[in-house]
Amino acid sequence: MASTAQAFARIDAGSIAAIFEGGKDAKEHPLVQCVQIKPIANGDTERYRVIFSDTKNYIQTMLATAANHHITGGSMKVNCFVKLMGYQANNVKGKKILIVTDLQVIPELGIMEKLGNPAPLEIKNEEESKPTAVTSNGFYGQQQQPQQSRSLPSHNKPPSSSAHANIYPIEALSPYSHKWTIKARCTNKSDIKTWHNMKGEGKLFSVNLLDESGEIRATGFNEQVDSLYELFQEGQVYYISSPCRVQIAKKQFSNLQNDYELAFERDTQVEKAEEATDVPQVKYNFTQISDLQSVEKDATIDLIGVLREVGETNQITSKTTSKPYDKRDLTLVDNTGYSIRLTIWGKTASTFDLNPDSVVAFKGVKVSDFGGRSLSLLSSGSMTASPDIAEAHKLKGWYDSQGHNESFATHANVTSTVAGGTGGSRDPFKTIAQTKDEGLGMDSEKADFFSLKASIQYIKQDNFCYPACLSEGCNKKVLEIEPGQWRCERCDKNHPKPQYRYIMSVNVSDHTGQLWLSCFDETGRVIMGISADELMEIKEVDEKKFSDYFSEANCRVWNWKCKAKMDSFQEQQRVRYQVSSASALNYVMESQKLAELIKQYNLGD
């Protein structure tokens, strides 16, 4: 462990000011001390704000998500020492903020009390700043700086051309960014989509862009489609320069972990980069097949597996356009001992030519609970055969040596085990009293999953369903804009009618208490025995028969697979219990379970 004197000797005093001022005194990789770490709320993305000190000054920084593993893995702690390997200096609303894209923890210096007495950063030639304010939560205050607009230096991997000297990391882009250039790889390009509505008609396309700090979606409309669509090619690297609008991301159209997206403008500059080795290939965050049971329905994931079976191409007719489109089912396995069905669509399905035993990586896959668990490749997703990454090489070695002879479990088997109540599920069996006594769902950071055996006491008849979009895989609510015209804002389409889907509040009880559960379409069909579309038709012609369906559903016992999660409703926090599946009791298996419980009491002795 180094001494305080040794740490003082190695830390780069004055390096923080040099980063913002530039010049010959700026260190390439300054060594600084981490004096504070604070997680910040940023939608679904985990982010951290970190204070670094060089003994003379301290600076508030934002850690790029690609560097989060230093904190989550435990190597970076308060009062440790790090080298800043990649960073971007920004001046946002008069505040000096450093975006750190890469760093290296220096373990030999250990952890020690804050060195020196660092002051808030003051840049030369600026008018005197106000004193630093320390907030009530003890976080370092930030000086109020005069409003200004200046280009600040960055230090990432050097650009290949002097014409693009000030490269921004994607992570640093925000609506407050003005003059900037990013160097990014196009990882996905959509087809050109057209729309026709009462306001007119138009066309658009989108691309996913990637650099070492993160990903962002960019969209071009009308004239930008004509000028940019052919220029962008998947896998190629580009310089993209403002003017280009940075706006809040429309999460319903993108599965990327970024709160912002780009909109190409008339004068946006796009130039193909000749040097592309410093920009990473596609980034994956793989979920193992065995873990899919704990992934929420409709979540978007990345997955890698060995191709076990390739189904035939089938044609399905669209409900909205009456046009046929292709689909193909693939079966994938991995070294966790599980298999999964994944569906690909359109041109990807019709041109698919990979052989079984190939390793395939998928980015942007939607999780469904159909048949327990199944997957569908989104139109914005991508598929890569035999990618040159460690996970692929490991899977290939495992499959060639032993995996090709193994048998694989499916998630349909796991679901049926839950239904039977044998205890083979990942989700523990609970009574209603236990869900409350154990505080399931009270942790706002995560959900709790559990199984429940309970009977239906009451189903609310008002608002039991909603009118949904007819487009394949959409299911968003549509609005009736005029008789016979239903509008979906997500798909930007009008439909002659909706498809009604269940969204039900169900009161259930067991011997320990009562609980309100939220059920969706798949569960509603099971407990009602009829689709929401059919039930709505009955409601319009026979109100009594409609009510009878709800009465008949009461007092029936089901096995429920549930998720408990903290939710906000009318500015109040409450736990919401959401059902992912419901299944009828298997009385043979229930009897076996009770017999095992009786044996545990040794009543026969």
Image (spheres, rainbow, N blue to C red):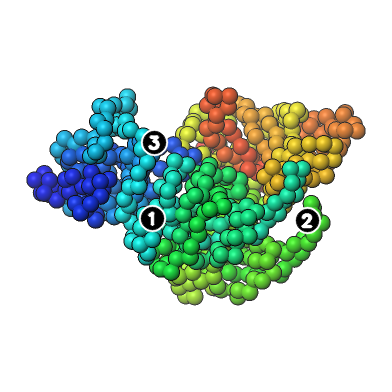
Q: Dot 2 corresponds to which residue?
A: 318
Residue found at x 82% / y 56%? 322
The residue tagged 1 is 167
From the viewer's side, name the closer residue of 41 and 534. 41
Residue 604 x %, y %: 55, 39
Q: Is residue 90 left or right of residue 540?
A: left
What amino acid is at disc 3?
Lys
Q: Residue at x 37, y 64 (%)?
A: 161
Packing grade of label 1 (10 A; few <14, some 14-19, many >=20) is many
Regarding residue 465, the answer to whether it shows in the image is yes
Q: Amino acid at mark 2?
A: Ser
Q: Which residue is mark 3?
A: 93
* Foreground disc of the pair 2, 1: 1
Location of residue 432 with respect to 267 vertically, above or below: above
What amino acid type is highlighted by mark number 1?
Ile
- Per the model, the C-alpha gap separating discs 3 and 2 is 49 Å
209 horizontally vs 51: left or right = right
